[in-house]
Amino acid sequence: MLVFIEKRLVLLATPKTGSTALHSALAPHADMAFRNLPQVKHMSLRRYMRFVAPLVAQYTDKPMETCALIRAPEDWLGSWYRYRQRDAIAATPRSTRGMDFDSFVGAYLSKPPPPPAAVGVQSRFLSGPRGEGGVDTLFRYEAMEAFCLWLSRRLDLPLELKRENVSPGGGGTPELSPAMRARLQAERAACFRLHEQAQA
């Protein structure tokens, strides 16, 4: 998460939406940069509002605008699935090796999800306390170019991203069975709806 007090902007780092590249490019210009430790770097909107917003309010009496990216739910889960197949965590409980994509998504939808599929929920990450409110400006991850142009104008800074922290395997999102896709759409309807409403 990056905070730009003078520009009245807070950039939330939704996991698996290019946040590492955005941080690398913009952190030197931020007044506050929350990075490295995942729980800190990927602070949700509600945690920002509870813990950081009161601190920011000590330095400005102007309202801050929050912004973020959201990824298409199936694509987002595909990125997590590939990311957790990397060699560095192959021997840990978080690895998805030996698990097909349908099984991963089924595990993700279970309560509670097991370690390989415990990756959070985008709609919860981007909503305020008790699920109320939400991020002020939300772009689709697929519209990264438009989001970068918006950020560049909003911050009055040139912005050029490098590819960083990319999930292994490339090749796009693995295929879900029709039944599992329907289950995902039903049980994560809020995520699909939020993605549909985001700027493209």
Image (cartoon, rainbow, N blue to C red):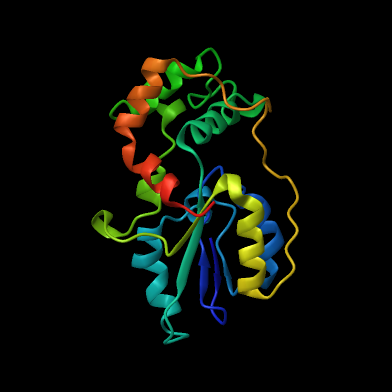
Write the residue at 37% across / 44% down.
Answer: 193
Please state if 124 lies on the left or on the right of 119 as rendered. Answer: left
In this rendering, the answer to whether 109 lies above or below 40 is: above
Task: Note whether residue 172 is visible.
Answer: yes
Write the residue at 47% across / 50% down.
Answer: 39
Residue 151 at what x, y percent from top left?
Answer: 62, 66
- Near-viewer residue (173 or 36): 173
Task: Note whether residue 113 is visible.
Answer: no
- Near-viewer residue (199 or 115): 199
- Near-viewer residue (136 or 198): 198
In this rendering, the answer to whether 56 lies above or below 85 is: below
Please state if 145 lies on the left or on the right of 124 as rendered. Answer: right
- Near-viewer residue (74 or 106): 74
Residue 49 at what x, y percent from top left?
Answer: 36, 66
Write the residue at 70% across / 57% down.
Answer: 24
Write the residue at 58% across / 57% down.
Answer: 35
Q: What is the residue that sits farthest to the left in this orientation?
A: 130
Residue 112 at what x, y percent from top left?
Answer: 30, 30
Residue 111 at what x, y percent from top left?
Answer: 28, 29
In this rendering, the answer to whether 10 lies above or below 185 is: below
